[in-house]
Image: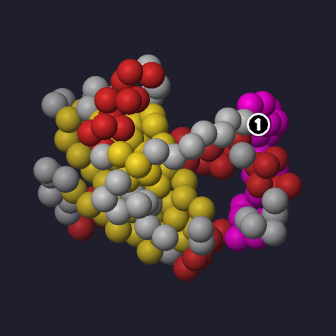
């Protein structure tokens, strides 16, 4: 399992990297060399924010947590990651051919008494609309006028389908897929 640790505005020493790798080692027996972790540690005032992204084949799992101590934040983030996988267990089992790399992990989760119930979610509404060519700034304006939290649009310059969205901090984000 490949583990990449990044400190953004903070130095991450070898001992800290070893402790984080030790906490993530439980995933190693299930996913082996197929998985890649990216851990980002960033100080925010009095707390440290830890974000863990796990990439397995074409699937991405992400969790983050904040705490005064880095290792406590890592523990919480790993727990959140496990919880996400546990909640999605039923859906994953139905599509097991797409998630074959998780088979043994799910078997071991099934033996866990604390398994969370999965509530089947379905698509209850579908919406179609015409993609309109516009700039990212025009898309933000259109999104605000509609009162939406995101907007899918056709970028005028490149012709790519993009998404603008409102971030929790009040700013905007732009997603530009490559294909």
Residue 94, percent across and down?
Answer: 86, 55
Q: Is residue 49 visible?
A: no
- Residue ranking furthest to the right: 94
Within-10-Å neighbours for mark 1: few <14, some 14–19, many 20+: few
Q: How many marks?
A: 1
Magenta-tinted stretch: 100-125
**In the picture provided, is 47 more to the left or to the right than 4?**
left
Residue 170, percent across and down?
Answer: 28, 26
Q: Which sits in the foreground, 87 or 146?
A: 146
Look at the picture and state if 58 lies above or below 83: below
Instruction: Tell me the element at label 1.
Output: loop
Q: Quadrant of residue 11?
A: bottom left
Q: Quadrant of residue 73?
A: top left
At a point 27% along the width and 39% down the height, the residue shown is 137
At a point 55% along the width and 79% down the height, the residue shown is 33
Residue 25, percent across and down?
Answer: 51, 65
**In the picture provided, is 79 more to the left or to the right than 4?**
right
At a point 44% along the width and 67% down the height, the residue shown is 178
Q: Which residue is mark 1?
A: 123
Q: Is residue 137 visible?
A: yes
**Colour option used:** secondary structure
Q: Is residue 75 magenta?
A: no
- Residue ranking furthest to the bottom: 33
**In the picture provided, is 123 more to the left or to the right than 140?**
right
**In the picture provided, is 54 more to the left or to the right than 104?**
left
At a point 43% along the width and 60% down the height, the residue shown is 160
Q: Is residue 113 magenta?
A: yes
Residue 162, percent across and down?
Answer: 43, 51
């Amino acid at each position: 399992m490949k583990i990449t640790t990044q400190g953004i505005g903070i130095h991450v020493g070898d001992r800290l990297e070893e402790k984080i790798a030790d906490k993530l080692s439980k995933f190693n027996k299930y996913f082996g060399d197929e998985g890649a972790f990216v851990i980002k540690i960033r100080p925010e005032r009095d707390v440290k924010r830890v974000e863990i992204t796990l990439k397995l084949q074409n699937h991405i799992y992400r969790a983050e947590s904040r705490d005064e101590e880095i290792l406590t934040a890592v523990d919480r983030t790993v727990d959140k990651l496990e919880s996400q996988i546990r909640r999605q267990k039923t859906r994953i089992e139905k599509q097991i051919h797409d998630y074959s790399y998780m088979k043994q992990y799910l078997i071991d989760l099934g033996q866990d008494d604390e398994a969370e119930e999965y509530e089947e979610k379905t698509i209850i509404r579908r919406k179609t609309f015409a993609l309109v060519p516009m700039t990212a700034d025009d898309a933000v304006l259109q999104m605000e006028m509609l009162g939406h939290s995101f907007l899918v649009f056709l970028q005028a310059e490149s012709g790519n389908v993009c998404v603008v969205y409102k971030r929790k901090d009040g700013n905007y984000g732009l997603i530009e897929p490559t294909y």
